[in-house]
Image (spheres, helix red, strand yellow):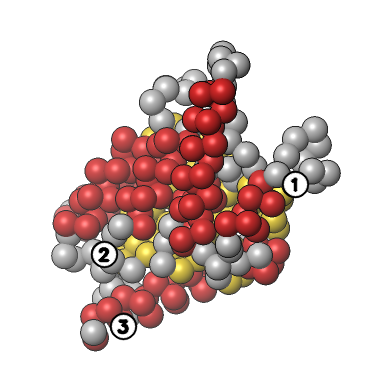
């Protein structure tokens, strides 16, 4: 009965938050799995028909993981089109500040603000068909055509570029060139990187799948325990 109750709780948690503790392994290492999918929902509530990751849900979960001595590492699985810049960058900063080993795996897409989220981890993977899109900051709604507005846009963009640069092997000039590249995205600026291209550009460490990501996070947890 207790086992069934535990299984129901785990299944319910996956359905509601996209997270589960992976601990059914021979090394008895407890790894927290967190999924970041759909659109990053920030200060505005998106329509109920949209698949979203709510940052006000993920932030306390990350704090709880940091506070839980039983959790030894965190695996992030991403398939996101981006979303709220402020919320996404807040999540990326929170992920990068975790003291426990972290690994990310890009499945499908990790676009726009999804790029900082993917690279925030200690080690990063992308599947062969996974894509990342780097483009300039965009804003929705009415834009006031004043110099201060453009300065504000540039400030936000510099924060994103700076974060990516600090967490990858990609320097600032290269990131900005990819952001402003023409000809790839129709009638827009930016660069699409698929699988191995993201590794070659220095954004992602390795091409791989779930088995590679699981092997890496367990290895990192073991090494941390020894040290």
* Rendering quarter of residue 74: bottom left
CA distance separating discs 2 and 1: 36 Å
Q: Residues within 10 Å of mark 3 (few under 14, many from 20)?
A: few
Q: In the rendered view, would you say 154 is above or below 110?
A: above
Q: Is residue 223 left or right of residue 38?
A: left
| Residue 208 spot, x, y in % from top left | 59, 70
Q: Residue reaching furthest front?
A: 147
Query: Which residue does the numbered mark 3 point to in the structure image?
Result: 223
User: 153 or 25: which is nearer to us?
Assistant: 153
Image-quadrant location for residue 174: bottom right
Of residue 121 and residue 86, the one placed in the foreground of this image is: 86
Q: Is residue 95 above or below residue 83?
A: below
- Asked if one can make out residue 36 in the rendered structure from this viewpoint, the answer is yes
Where, quadrant-wise, is the C terminus in this rendering? bottom left
In-front residue for pair 171/115: 171
Q: What kind of element bears circle 2? A: loop
């Amino acid at each position: 009965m207790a086992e069934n109750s535990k299984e129901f709780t785990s299944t319910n948690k996956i359905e509601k938050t996209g997270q589960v503790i992976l601990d059914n392994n021979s090394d008895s290492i407890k790894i927290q799995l967190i999924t970041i999918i759909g659109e990053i929902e920030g200060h505005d509530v998106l329509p109920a028909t949209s698949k979203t990751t709510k940052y006000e849900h993920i932030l306390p979960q990350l704090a709880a993981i940091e506070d839980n001595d039983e959790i030894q590492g965190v695996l992030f699985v991403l398939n996101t089109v981006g979303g709220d810049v402020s919320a996404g960058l807040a999540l990326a900063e929170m992920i990068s500040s975790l003291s426990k080993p972290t690994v990310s795996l890009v499945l499908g897409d990790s676009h726009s603000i999804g790029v900082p989220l993917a690279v925030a981890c200690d080690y990063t993977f992308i599947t062969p068909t996974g894509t990342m899109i780097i483009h300039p900051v965009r804003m929705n709604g009415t834009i006031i055509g004043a110099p201060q507005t453009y300065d504000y846009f540039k400030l936000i963009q510099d924060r994103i570029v700076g974060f990516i640069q600090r967490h990858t092997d990609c320097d600032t000039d290269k990131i900005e060139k990819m952001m402003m590249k023409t000809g790839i995205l129709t009638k827009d600026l930016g660069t699409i990187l698929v699988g191995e291209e993201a590794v070659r550009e220095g954004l992602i460490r390795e091409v791989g799948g779930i088995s590679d990501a699981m092997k890496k996070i367990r290895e990192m947890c073991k090494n941390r325990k020894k040290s």
